[in-house]
Image: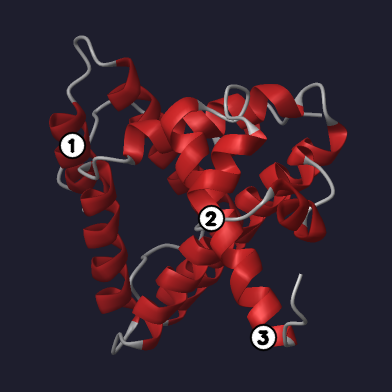
């Protein structure tokens, strides 16, 4: 293999990761062969193993890059926003757009496959967990910014809890879209916006926080 500069090595490594992700999205990482990845990345098997010692290493790299790319995209949006309110509007717009993305179902299937594999593979579980921690921490920082600027009202808003809820809703909507059937993805998103804006309220008295079970 020709001697490459460090920045060229990093660029080539990123190209291989992107090629592997494209293959995983098409057929899942279990069914994807090393030969398919090599063809997609236009590299020889020997060249591939120069960058990644195993297919598992490549899967872990795909997980990390997906999280880093997503978080960086959000950070860029925030940097371009005038305040927390406009930042939330930007994020909401991206959220809705992602739900209409033709790749979203394939990405959800891939993540499910990775989660299931992570139950048997501690290394993949740790990588996947870290990727979601990155997303949650970013959302937590955004909620804190919203609190400081008065986007949220009330003294009982917990940034980490709110970030965790938003992540859970996002994942739940993606799962519902994937399941199809009677799941109304567009209606669910409209209801979510109305609920977040306080336009949907219940007359049922919520339980006191002190009465809610706390997971051990």
Describe the colour scheme in one phrase: secondary structure
Disc 1 to disc 3, how far (Cα)?
47 Å
Q: How many marks?
A: 3
Q: Position of residue 47 (x, y in %)?
A: 73, 57
Mark in front: 3 vs 2: 2
Foreground of the two, 134 or 164: 134
Q: Does the residue at mark 1 contact the one at mark 3 (Cβ under 8 Å)?
A: no
Q: Is residue 107 above or below residue 177?
A: below
In the rendered structure, the answer to whether residue 203 lies left or right of residue 34 reads left
Please report the residue visible at 64 percent of the width from the left and 82 percent of the height from the top.
8
Q: Position of residue 41 (x, y in %)?
A: 54, 54
Q: Is residue 154 above or below residue 174?
A: below
* Label 1 crowd (10 A; few <14 / some 14-19 / many >=20): some
Disc 3 to disc 2, how far (Cα)?
19 Å
First in sequence: mark 1 vs mark 3:
3
Look at the image and tell me whether residue 53 can be seen: yes
Q: Position of residue 205 (x, y in %)?
A: 36, 28
Please report the residue visible at 81 percent of the width from the left and 21 percent of the height from the top.
120
In the drawing, what numbered circle is on residue 191? 1
* Label 3 crowd (10 A; few <14 / some 14-19 / many >=20): few
Q: Report which residue position mark 3 lands on.
A: 7
In the drawing, what numbered circle is on residue 42? 2
Q: Does the residue at mark 1 contact the one at mark 2 (Cβ under 8 Å)?
A: no
Disc 1 to disc 2, how far (Cα)?
46 Å
Task: Locate the N terminus by quadrant.
Answer: bottom right
Foreground of the two, 25 or 147: 25
Helix, strand or loop at mark 2 = loop
């Amino acid at each position: 293999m020709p001697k490459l500069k460090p920045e060229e090595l990093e660029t080539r490594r990123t190209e291989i990761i992107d090629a592997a992700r494209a293959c995983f999205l098409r057929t899942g990482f279990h069914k994807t062969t090393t030969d398919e990845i090599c063809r997609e990345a236009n590299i020889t098997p020997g060249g591939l193993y120069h960058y990644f010692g195993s297919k598992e290493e490549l899967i872990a790299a795909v997980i990390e890059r997906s999280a880093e790319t997503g978080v960086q995209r959000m950070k860029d949006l925030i940097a371009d926003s005038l305040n927390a309110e406009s930042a939330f509007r930007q994020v909401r717009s991206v959220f809705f757009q992602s739900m209409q993305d033709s790749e979203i179902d394939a990405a959800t299937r891939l993540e499910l496959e990775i989660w299931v594999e992570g139950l048997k593979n501690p290394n993949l579980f740790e990588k996947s967990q870290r990727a979601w921690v990155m997303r949650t921490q970013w959302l937590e920082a955004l909620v804190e910014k919203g609190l400081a600027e008065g986007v949220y009202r009330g003294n009982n808003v917990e940034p980490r809890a709110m970030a965790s809820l938003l992540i859970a809703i996002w994942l739940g909507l993606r799962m519902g879209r994937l399941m199809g059937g009677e799941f109304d993805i567009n209606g669910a998103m409209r209801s979510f916006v109305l609920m977040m804006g306080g336009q949907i309220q219940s007359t049922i008295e919520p339980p006191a926080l002190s009465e809610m079970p706390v997971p051990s």
